[in-house]
Structures are given as structure tokens and as C-alpha cells.
Image: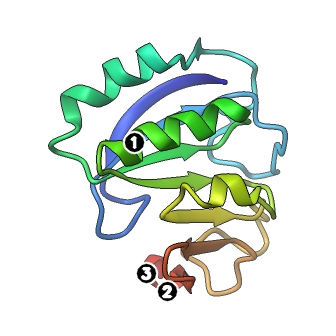
């Protein structure tokens, strides 16, 4: 699993201060995507050591770790578990419609669905994308409108 960059945001998960890892090699390549730079198989390998070196300086300031875009593998499961051990919430943004139960068990929030320009993103009433509070099984799209 490779990443392009990381950032801190108040937007991706409403009510949370999030550290976002932008994962590359996205297989979905949605027309109109706002993160086309994540389509390429580029960036650095997100090893456990590199992940911790980015996470640790912020762990007392953030509440959630988000994996955004890209394509992930079994390594994602390990990184989610590390965040949870540090009492951080976890979130995955994916263009996929479905995510394995094993990954879902480690998530607090999950955004699914490809971006369809005509339907808009999470800030659109007509979007096909869904943002879930996984632990409470509550659709949270209204928080983006």
C-alpha cells in the first residue's frame, strides 16, 4: 500500500479532527474525481514504521485516522488496528460499494460508492455515495449538506 501524502482536516469526518492518508493506485478512476493524482501507482510504501512516524506527533491532537482514495491491501487492517490501540477512531473513504467484514469491524466511519458527477458528492441530496457511522449503523450524509 502506497501513499502520496497526509494532512490534517476538519472536513472529511464531521465533528472530528482527522489525519488523512491519501492512498495511491486507485482502481476506480471515477470521471470527475477531485483526486486524480491518486490514480497513479506512486508515492511511498506506507510501512508500519512510516505510519507511526507520521501519526505519533499528532496522536494527542487528532481524533480520527482516515484512509482516502487509492487501493489498499491486508496492510490496511494492521494500520487500522494500530490507530484503534491508540484510542483513535478510524475511517475509510472508498469508491467501492462493498468492504470486507474484517475491515468494517475496525472502522468507526465508512464512505462507499464511486463518484458520479451527475449525482454529486456527499454534499448532494442526489448522491449515490454513503457515509456511515459504522458503530451505530447510522447514515450520516445529512452532515455534509
Residue 81 placement (x, y as % from top left): 48, 42
Give the distance between the C-alpha atoms of the residues marked 2 and 1, in whole angstroms: 26 Å
Location of the N terminus (image quadrant): top right
Q: Earlier in the sequence, mark 2 or mark 1?
A: 1
Residue 83 marker: 1
Q: Which residue appears at 70% of the width and 78% of the height? A: 127
The residue closer to the viewer here, 61 or 135, is: 135
SS state under label 2 = helix
| Residue 74 point in image, percent of width and height | 71, 34
Q: Is residue 25 above or below residue 62?
A: above
Q: Is residue 120 visible?
A: yes
Mark seen at residue 142: 2
**Near-viewer residue (3 or 50):** 50
Give the mark nearest the N terminus, 1 or 3: 1
In the image, taking residue 71 as reference, residue 15 lies left or right, namely left
Report how many numbered discs are placed on residues in the image: 3
Residues under numbered marks 1 and 3 in contact, where contact means CB atoms less than 8 Å apart: no
Check disc 3 and report the residue beneath it.
143
Amino acid at each position: 500500500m502506497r501513499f502520496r501524502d497526509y494532512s490534517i482536516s476538519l472536513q472529511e469526518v464531521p465533528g472530528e479532527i482527522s489525519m488523512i492518508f491519501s492512498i495511491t493506485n486507485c482502481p476506480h478512476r471515477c470521471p470527475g474525481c477531485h483526486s486524480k493524482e491518486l490514480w497513479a501507482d506512486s508515492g511511498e510504501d506506507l510501512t508500519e514504521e512510516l505510519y507511526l512516524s507520521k501519526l505519533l506527533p499528532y496522536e494527542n491532537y487528532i481524533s480520527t485516522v482516515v484512509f482516502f482514495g487509492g487501493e489498499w491491501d491486508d496492510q490496511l487492517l494492521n494500520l487500522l488496528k494500530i490507530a484503534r490501540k491508540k484510542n483513535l477512531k478510524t475511517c475509510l473513504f472508498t469508491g467501492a460499494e462493498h468492504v470486507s467484514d474484517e475491515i468494517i469491524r475496525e472502522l468507526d466511519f465508512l464512505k462507499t460508492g464511486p463518484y458520479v458527477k451527475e449525482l454529486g458528492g456527499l454534499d448532494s441530496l442526489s448522491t449515490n455515495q454513503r457515509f456511515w457511522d459504522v458503530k451505530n449503523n447510522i447514515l450520516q450524509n445529512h452532515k455534509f449538506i
